Image: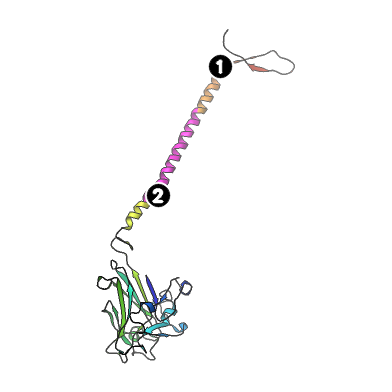
Amino acid sequence: MYRLNMGGPKLTRQNDTLGRTWENDKKYLHVNGSAASVSVIPSIIKYTESVTPEIAPNWVYATAQTMGNANVANLDFNITWVLPVDPDFTNFVRAHFCDIVSTSLNTLVFNLFINSENAYPDIDLSTVIGNLDVPVYKDFVCNSSDNLSTLTVSIGPDSVADYQNAVLNGLEILKISNEARSLDGLTSVENFVLFTSKKTTKPALVIGCVLAGLVAIVGLLLCYCFLVVKRSKTGNQTPSWLPLPLHGNSLTMTKVSTVSH
């Protein structure tokens, strides 16, 4: 459904290790100008064994939306993204983080909200990761907001932070199939499987008919051969032709009628 590169350009399939597309997040911001984009050189991103480029390309972690220098009067605020979703389905949410704004450890602490609930409080990336410029992600499963056709994601400062700031590098929102194992309604996928299995019986029926036809043809050929052999034996016992007088060095034979006069 959504793959957002926060504060960065649109990434096409050619820029992603798994051929995914990441769009810029700006059009989903609840308040224009409420976030400030930051970026670093993608090559400084330090991947780990648990977070590899297959999770997200380094261009996602090298850009971010932050509160720093945002064009708002009150610095104690949340940056919020509003995304249309199907209210009848549960959603998988993956938030991507990478501290590319701090100059030292243990200075950035913030909160992540989903549908106005504090889904990930007191995020201290220095404690979680132990270094700067190292990517990490967090997964959630949630419904739409108050049965509306939207899902909101927000980041905001924590009261224990040394300075007011928050960061989000990337966001993925994917629809989860319902009890019918469908992504588009209440029709179960078993219906399609059964329909497919019925179609697969047609080749078997055709093959059966072909084999039956071959058996019938072989039977007819055997009967024909039997009749030919029987007729030839009968011809040897009572020939229907008579020899004519010998002329020169050849012997000519011809059929004659066996009808009595």
Residue name at image x 35 percent, y 70 percent:
174
- Give the magenta range: 197-223
**Mark 2 falls on what kind of element?**
helix
Q: In which quarter of the image is the C terminus?
A: top right
Residue 113, placed above or below residue 18: below
For residue 200, which numbered disc appears in the image? Answer: 2
Residue 12, placed above or below residue 255: below
Seen from the viewer's position, the closer of residues 114 and 70 is 70
Image location of residue 101, percent across then percent down: 39, 88
Query: Is residue 58 part of the magenta span, yes or no?
Result: no
Given the current orientation, which residue lies at the most extreme right position? 248
| Residue type, numbered disc 2 | Thr
Give the image quarter of residue 209: top left
Seen from the viewer's position, the closer of residues 162 and 105 is 162
Left or right for 187, reference 233: left
How far apart are the alpha carbons under marks 1 and 2? Answer: 58 Å
Query: Is residue 213 part of the magenta span, yes or no?
Result: yes
**Which residue, given by chain and number where applicable, does mark 1 sit on?**
237
- Which is closer to the viewer, label 1 or label 2? 2
Image location of residue 139, percent across then percent down: 32, 75
Image location of residue 179, percent across then percent down: 28, 62
Identify the mark nearer the N-term, 1 or 2: 2
Image location of residue 70, percent across then percent down: 36, 88
Give the image quarter of residue 40: bottom left
